[in-house]
Amino acid sequence: MMETGDWVTPRLYGRPWFEKPPLLYWGAALSFKLFGVSEAAARLPSAICALLATLALAWLALRLYGAETARWLLLLLPTTAGMIGFSHAAATDMPFSGMLTIAMVCAAVVFGLTRNENTPILPRTLWLALVLFGFFLGLAVLAKGPAAIVLCGGAVFFWALFTKRWRDALRLLHPASIASFCLTALPWYILCAQRNPDFFRVFIIEHNVKRYLTPEFQHIQPFWFYGSVLLVAFLPWTALFLWSAVHGAIHLWRTRCAKEHTWFLVCWAGFCVIFFSISQSKLPGYVLPAIAPLTLSLSHFIWSSRYTAKGALIAGLVVTATGLGTTGVLLSHSFIHLAPKYDSLSQFVALVLYTIGLSTFLLGLSFLSRLSSPARNALLASCVAVLLVLVGSAKILLTRWNLDSISTDWLADALRQDSVSLHQLRVFRIPRSFHYGLNFYLHREIPDWETDRVADGYVLSDGSYCDRLATEQECHDLWGMRDFSSGSWALLRVTPDLSVQRSRSGEHVQKKE
């Protein structure tokens, strides 16, 4: 978009590309224009969306539960593995989740959930909330498509079902919100469909309906897949997340009732997880919108548990920290036997476990009742500082342990250092994400070996060697002696086999005679 000036039709190497709507592309192209083409510029839109969503959710926490819950949210949400990972990714997941989160916060205002005796909802506030709801829901549709309407509509439907507040739920269909949504989302969809007759079929049918209903895109996972994804996404606070989830589920089962804003958060997160668990195509980023309401519930639970279940909470955190540290020791001292090529990876994982364990231990100490407020704040600050040091030094550590080969940036640099002729380069059975990453870093489309073979060239593969190419040409591995601590990359050199060529030319001469 930046190079061609066409901001309507997404293109990948000259061909229309309709897998996703354009919000991320617009943000990245604008970032490229302002700051130049770089990794940081490509990732900036996701980081901004994560920041806006965090601030909006902190405001909701302040209105629902008070300042302490908002502070806990600002501590927990930005430091979860899910938020850190996706806010650094040049992918559509964080823009989609961020815009949907802000839309749901606006919906909570429309429902009157943020109203109290000190800060009533004024008529102009309601109008503003309706307009902003439509605007941010429209941006979510521009980020990833009609899934935004489904997730928002499903969550609101079940909230109304459990609370019997159907009239409040129908407020979202106010003409102001509908007009705001249509003015935001529809212009691009209409223009793109007019310019590209295949847009509806490719985007709506293939990449939305078929992706959800069929395993055509090969993202097949078991029904419980997102349970494990959430456990990883909440690191290093997984122990707290499990504790709050179990405690909250038991309380809800026993009482059979909950406050309206509690149902709102439960339906917001629960519908997202269940909806995508039913899907035939599952990727980790699909449940990113559920992390925001779950973290808000977790923040409120932690603050309320300081007085009701503090002992059990401290014990759970200390046990979790001990378990993480023990696992790290077992990995780093080879008590857990892995293949030799994973030795460096196990050392890095052990360091991550040590860091998360220390952070969890410091968090547990912060709940001790004998601590003064300055001491408690110092422990919490240390808890965050430990995690920030790990994140900040990750690139140095990956290079130190030769783990940077998991990056397509490293692969592109390695190809340049070996003076590989890019017009002769092909890829063979490498992950799709690596293929597109190489295209970005090399600034050209690298053909696939199986569709565009060369008699004289190079083939980059992941775990596939000359015997897998099924070629009659000469072939040898240029990277056979390299140490890849986290993979099995091979750069195969394919050259013409002169004996085969002479044999074929002899057969040709005999046929002429």
Image: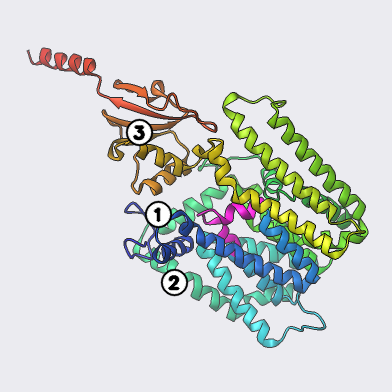
Tell me which corner region of the image, top left, top right, bottom left or bottom right, holds residue 121: bottom right
Check disc 3 and report its element: helix, strand or loop.
loop
Question: Which residue reaches farthest left?
Answer: 513
User: Does any portion of residue 11 appear in the rendered image?
Assistant: yes
In the image, residue 389 lies at what x, y percent?
65, 51
At 72% across and 60% down in the image, what residue appears?
A: 75
SS at circle 2: helix
The residue pinned by badge 3 equals 449
Q: Which residues are drawn in magenta? A: 81-98
Earlier along the polypeptide chain: callout 2 or callout 1? 1
Q: Quadrant of the N terminus?
A: bottom left
Regarding residue 283, the answer to whether it shows in the image is no
9 or 469, which lies in front?
469
Find disc 1 in the rendering and name its residue: 17
Q: Are marks 2 and 3 in contact (CB under 8 Å)?
A: no
| First in residue order: circle 2 vs circle 3 | 2
